[in-house]
Image (cartoon, helix red, strand yellow):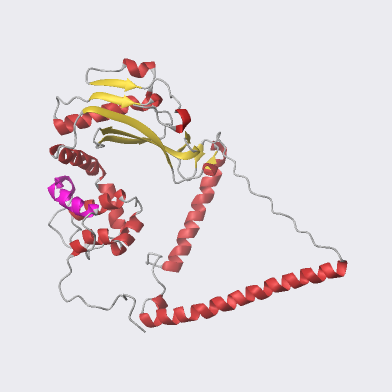
Amino acid sequence: MANFYREPDRRQRFLLPVDMSEWVCETDMVHLLLDAIELMDLSAFEAHYTRRGTGAPPFAPSMMVCVLIYAYANGHRSSRKIERLCERDAGLRMIVGDEVPDHSVIARFRKRHRSAFEALFAEVLKLCHRAGLVRLGVVALDGTKVKANASPAANRTAGSLEAEVAALVSAAEETDAAEDALFGDERGDDLPADLRNACGRLARLQACPDRLRGEANARAARQQEKIDARAAEEDATGKRKRGRKPKPAEAVVDEEAKANVTDPDSRIMKSRKGYLQGYNAQAVVTAEQIILAPDVTNQANDVRQLVPMIDKTLAMAEAVMGEDARIGTALMDAGYWSEDNVALETADCEYLIATTKIPWAGGRRPAR
């Protein structure tokens, strides 16, 4: 038989040192991120550490910052998931090499340097400004409803929260105790002991098809017994047996609930696709789509977000371009319209706010 397929040789040893820059394609953002981190001022992160003392040296702040930015940019928030991806994801492996940080290290670094991360955002804008990407004159503000990691059905009234919280705490303690007894000091997602070597894996894999076939045969036999019993009953009675259809479940959203036990800060909000449990994300961007000021609030109405978002934009513009920076014109949709907001317009920023929401004719955008 011809050797038609290209089979990987997973036991091939490298004859030359590995070049990690070849692990991901040239178009991946990790290359740009690594170069940008080298140009940023990370002294606020480095000031926390000292060269005196004993013990293992800490992970490089530049590496940790790069790990968090790359992971967050790809939608990964969990420290445990980031740790696993540092072992599996080519982009993160290129950042960390063989120095994989533990999930607790990742979480502590983020918590310890939160204020420094906020300052780093201004540094990113400064780099964009130097590259000619940040140009004021016209900026746009808008908001969108973001679904929280919580269900509307998890909302509770104030009267039921105390008892439920006590039950949840007890359940959490029992769960932790059970997992400690089951996993010990391990992470909990590690392979069983008999699957950590080639011989054990092969034996387990060979036994799996036999077990699956046995279970399938047993299920088929039980099902056939039910079919035969039903047929015998119909023959004995001369009547066809009728079954009852299951009643479908109904999902009810209680809009009068006071708090959500999964995410207490989230709120029920109306979006284009209906109601969701989540947040209202705000952003002010330039004409070149450079973000000047982001924020997330649990207030569903955009009207109250205009003033704080413009203030944040002015503060960022002054930090990046100096005290004489001016926004120019801010564009906003009808969600930000109010007489009070219009009265707050200043010489630093002219407001252009839609007063009404005009429906599109035939589902198409109006001609410009």
Above or below residue 3? Residue 310 is above
Quadrant showing the C terminus: top left
- Front in this rendered view, residue 324 or 363: 363
Tell me if I can see residue 362 in this picture: yes
Q: In the image, 145: left or right of 68?
A: right
Residue 107 coordinates in the image, percent (x, y) = 31, 53
Tell me where the magenta segment starts and ends, as one range.
29-47
- Dividing the picture into quadrants, the one containing residue 234 is bottom right
Residue 116: x %, y % from top left: 22, 43
> On the image, which quarter does residue 350 sit in?
top left
Extreme residue toward the right, this view: 237
Q: Who's the residue at 34% across and 77% down the image?
A: 4
Image quadrant in which the N terminus is located: bottom left
Residue 56 appears anywhere in the view = no
Q: Position of residue 40 (x, y in %)?
A: 15, 46
340 sits left or right of 94 in the view: right
Residue beneath the point at 51% across and 53% down: 170
Taking 88 as reference, is 277 above or below it? above
